[in-house]
Amino acid sequence: MEERVREPDVAAGAGARAAALDEADPLRPLRDRFLLTDEVVAYLDGNSLGRPLQDTGERLERFARQRWGARLIRGWDEGWMAEPERLGDELGRVVLGAAPGQTVVGDSTSVLLYKAIRAALAARPGRDEVVLAAADFPTDRFLLQGIADETGARLVALDAPHDGGVEVDQVAEAVGERTAAVVLSHVAYRSAAVVDAAAVTAAAHAAGALTVWDLSHSVGALPLHLDDWRVDLAVGCSYKYLNGGPGAPAFLYARRDLLPALRQPVQGWMGAAEVFAMGERYEPDAGIRRFLSGTPPILAMRPIADMLALIDEAGIDAVRAKSSALTSFAIEWFDAELAPLGVRLASPRDPARRGSHVTIDHERFRDVVPALQRRGVIPDFRGPDGLRIGLSPLSTSFTELLTGLEAIREELTR
Ligand SMILES: *Cc1c(COP(=O)(O)O)cnc(C)c1O
């Protein structure tokens, strides 16, 4: 459990503490690699859209001139064709804990989730139930509603506490011989609660079911060990902690030994065994490329590769350590300064059970958040009354976080 030292003068000493934490932060120099602007004084929404790197614009321009412009269609034979798997393997190595050949970069998270869930259902014929979290991110729930309509599957929704996540015991109780798949977010988008992916996967497997994980709020912020956890399928977003830019393509992981049994429903030419055979019938690629459908978004993949290199340089364990220190600092300050104002914590107190954001609730946050945004302090609002403090470990400093926290208090007491 987290150590809670509530000192009476936390606020008075907070500036000095934030400065000391920044001073001692081994990752601090890496913050300068990001594009920082004066107008934004506290960016607390890197969990929704990460900042660009300083040189992202220049690199994209160089790519447009030297690769796209100069090489033109030849670029496909000179590396672009292999890019979805190459970048997938790099994701596997740096942030997913996945051996090569199991990860591919392609469509949006929503589309890849759809493909993953349909593939899981198709791999478990005769089973017609899917377990999900009742409070999961809308796209996950909406996709499952659509898939239930299409396939006749029955949805089994698990409740979780407002400030927590789904527990392994709930999953163990919900799965059975009718369960085809368990579909969950690894880190809950609202509470930031971390689900025990290894234990849940084991519980699903014990019932003969597959797991599909949404890693959108964990990838790039905390270490993942998909191979060791025996995860079946996973998808994740690359514009949050992977700083890929607005609408950057998502990734999909599928465990190697399962691949031959996985068929996804969007059978496009780029997922076919022989892309340029122009044959009669669709035959899926033998490997992970079977999850592709159309032409890969090469341009949009480039910033992801640069951010991965930065995470590799920092080390994902050091990223996680800083993330925990940032969220712990936020909660300590919340206890001292915001709880007395009637603000409620809606995230787990145990840092081991918490992702890289902290959600706090207050009736006035719907109005406070736009007021904060006007002064360059940027968290986000999640209904009915939540303010999310997103802490992107490599681009956020403790001093920046404190500036944001103090502004929240000011707006609340105005
Ligand atoms: C951000 C997020 C997504 C994003 O889906 P898109 O298809 O990129 O819009 C999906 N699931 C979760 C849990 C998310 O947090």
Image (tube, rainbow, N blue to C red):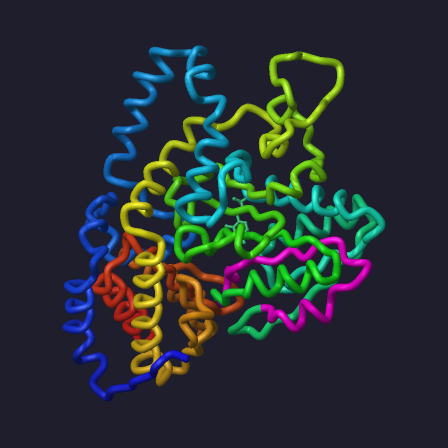
Vertical side of 392 occupied by 360: above or below: below
Quadrant containing the N terminus is bottom left
Magenta-colored stretch includes residue 172: yes
Image spot of residue 28 (x, y percent)? 20, 56
- Taking depth in this image into account, of 318 and 141 the one nearest to the observer is 318
Task: Name the spot of residue 326 as percent of width and height, x first.
Answer: 31, 66
Q: Residue at x 32, y 69 (%)?
A: 408
Q: Residue furthest right?
A: 126
> Which of the pair 113/408 is nearer the observer?
113
Residue stretch in magenta: 166-191
Where, quadrant-wise, is the C terminus in this rendering?
bottom left
- Residue 283 in the image: state x and y as whole percent: 71, 24
Q: Is 288 part of what is drawn in magenta?
A: no
- Where residue 96 appears, as percent x and y from the top left, is 46, 49
For residue 176, what is the image quadrant? bottom right
The residue located at (30%, 62%) in the rendering is 322
Against 400, residue 164 (above or below) is below
Q: How many marks?
A: 0
Q: Is residue 349 above or below residue 157?
A: below
Q: Residue at x 27, y 57 (%)?
A: 396
Q: Nearer the viewer, residue 83 or 102?
A: 102
Residue 413 lies left or right of residue 388; in this view the side is left
Q: Is residue 378 visible?
A: no
Residue 174 in view of the camera: yes
Residue at the (42%, 76%) spot, across then down: 349
Residue at the farthest bottom position: 8
